Structure formats: structure tokens, C-alpha cells
Image (cartoon, rainbow, N blue to C red):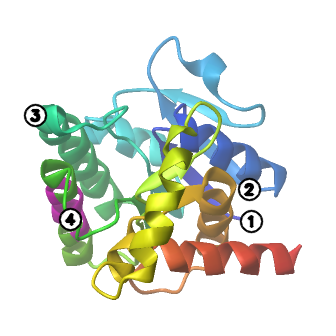
């Protein structure tokens, strides 16, 4: 059993991940804003605070051995570069500062596929956060999806023929795989595997690694 703190737990991925963690018997707390307690899955302990403040995260951690950092700008878009710096980057620095003085032995960070030919500011901020986490010396898992499919997030399915075509061409095959679409349940399962079986070093889960880990989760049921 792991003891975890999840930041960004009321989001699309956070709620699905927390529900699965609780179901599997882990002790989960989530740092939420006032008024957001009701958005968390049953069985998750809510701690009210600001995910941009180190002291609030440190208070919420308690004796947690795993910190899952999911905070980010909703619906990322190229014109939201300032929000990436003011929210995504600041929240990551705050979480990392809190983790350094705690019992955290595993930092799980929701990053993004990289390199990428678009969303440059978003990718730049996430890559910089990865570098800071690496430099801390805390064993980490960087989860790097490009677009996660799920309820209300299925419009990119119309791009599947384009992905198929790009995957046939040697010059674009690697990029098409790296920036491929991936279902929410696969990301959740991959993160569960990473949380339950920490490697003790830095691990990168790109699209292909997420898919492989999800298969490992199924085989362990």
C-alpha cells in the first residue's frame, strides 16, 4: 500500500487515477481548493490548500511516500503561454520544494510528449520541470502523453486516418507514434504500475511505454 498526495486531483485524469488508487487499497489525499471537495472520488481525503504554495503542499504531504503532480492549465493552447509559466511551472516548483523536505521517495509528474512541432511554450515548461525534478535527486516517473482520449475528449479521433498515413512514412513515423492519441484508461493503468512498482530511478513513460505498462497492469489483475 502506498500513501500518496495528488495535486490536480479534481481534473480529468486526477479523478480517474484517484478512484483506481482507492479501489486498490492505497491511502490517497488530494490538495484541493475550497469548494472542490465534492469533486473528489469517494475514499480520497481532501486537504484544502493552494497548489501554487510550497507550504500548503508540505502541510498536505504528511508522511506520504509518493507525490503525484497533475496540476496544469486546463485545455492547453498556444495562446496560453503565460498560464503555463504562472500555473504549470510555479506549481511544479512548489511541489518539488515541498517534496525535498518530506518522506517522498517517488515523484510522479504528468509531463507531455517531446519533442513536438507545436505547443512550444507548453512543451518548454514541462521539459524545464522535468529537469528540475531530475536535479533534485528524487526518483521520478515522467508520464508523457500528447492527447488523452476520454469522455468529452474524443474529437481528435477524426485525425486517426492522418496518424495512420504519417505512420507509414519513414520521415514521420516516429513523430506520429510519439504524438499519438492514447485512451484515459491506459494512462491511468500505466501510472498505477509506476506507483506500485517504483524503479528507484528516473523513468520516462512515453506513448509506447504507457501502452506497455497498461498491458502489464492487466496481466497483474
Q: CA distance from mark 3 to mark 2?
A: 36 Å
Residue at 17% of width from left, 39% of height from top? 78
Report if the CB atoms under discs 4 and 1 are less than 8 Å apart: no
Q: CA distance from mark 4 to mark 3?
A: 16 Å
Viewer can see residue 144:
yes
Image position of 3 with respect to 6: above or below: below
Q: Nearer the viewer, mark 2 or mark 4?
A: 4
Report if the CB atoms under discs 2 and 1 are less than 8 Å apart: yes
Q: Which mark is residue 1?
A: 1
Which numbered disc flags the more N-terminal residue, 2 or 1?
Answer: 1
Residue furthest to the top in view is 35
Residue nearest the observer in this picture, 40 or 180:
180
Q: Secondary structure at mark 2?
A: loop
- Pointer 2 residue: 26
Which numbered disc flags the more N-terminal residue, 4 or 1?
Answer: 1
In the displayed structure, does residue 157 sit left or right of residue 128? right
Report if the CB atoms under discs 3 and 1 are less than 8 Å apart: no
Q: Secondary structure at mark 3?
A: helix
Image position of 99 with respect to 62: above or below: below
Q: CA distance from mark 4 to mark 1?
A: 30 Å
Whole-percent x, y for residue 5 in the image? 53, 48
Whole-percent x, y for residue 11 in the image? 52, 34
Residue nearest the observer in this picture, 159 or 100:
159
Q: Secondary structure at mark 1?
A: loop
Task: Identify the image quadrant of the N terminus.
Answer: bottom right
- Pointer 3 residue: 82
- Pointer 4 residue: 127
Whole-percent x, y for residue 174 in the image? 36, 82
Image position of 183 with respect to 72: above or below: below
Q: Which residues are magenta?
A: 124-130
Q: CA distance from mark 2 to mark 4?
A: 29 Å
Amino acid at each position: 500500500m502506498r500513501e500518496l498526495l495528488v495535486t490536480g486531483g479534481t481534473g480529468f485524469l486526477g479523478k480517474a487515477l484517484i478512484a483506481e488508487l482507492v479501489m486498490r487499497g492505497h491511502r490517497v489525499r488530494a490538495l484541493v481548493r475550497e469548494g472542490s471537495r465534492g469533486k473528489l472520488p469517494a475514499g480520497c481525503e481532501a486537504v484544502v490548500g493552494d497548489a501554487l504554495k510550497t507550504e500548503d503542499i508540505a502541510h498536505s504531504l504528511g508522511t506520504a511516500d509518493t507525490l503525484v503532480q497533475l496540476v496544469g492549465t486546463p485545455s492547453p493552447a498556444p495562446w496560453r503561454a503565460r498560464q503555463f509559466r504562472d500555473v504549470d511551472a510555479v506549481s511544479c516548483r512548489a511541489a518539488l520544494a515541498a517534496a525535498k523536505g518530506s518522506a517522498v521517495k517517488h515523484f510522479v509528474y504528468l509531463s507531455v510528449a517531446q519533442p513536438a512541432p507545436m505547443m512550444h511554450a507548453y512543451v518548454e515548461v514541462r521539459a524545464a520541470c522535468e529537469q528540475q525534478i531530475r536535479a533534485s535527486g528524487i526518483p521520478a516517473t515522467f508520464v508523457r502523453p500528447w492527447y488523452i482520449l476520454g469522455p468529452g475528449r474524443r474529437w481528435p479521433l477524426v485525425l486517426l486516418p492522418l496518424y495512420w498515413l504519417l505512420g507509414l512514412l519513414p520521415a514521420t513515423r516516429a513523430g506520429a507514434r510519439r504524438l499519438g492519441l492514447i485512451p484515459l484508461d491506459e494512462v491511468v493503468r500505466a501510472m498505477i504500475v509506476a506507483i506500485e512498482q517504483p524503479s528507484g530511478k528516473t523513468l520516462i513513460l512515453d506513448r509506447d511505454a504507457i501502452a506497455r505498462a497498461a498491458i502489464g497492469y492487466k496481466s497483474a489483475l
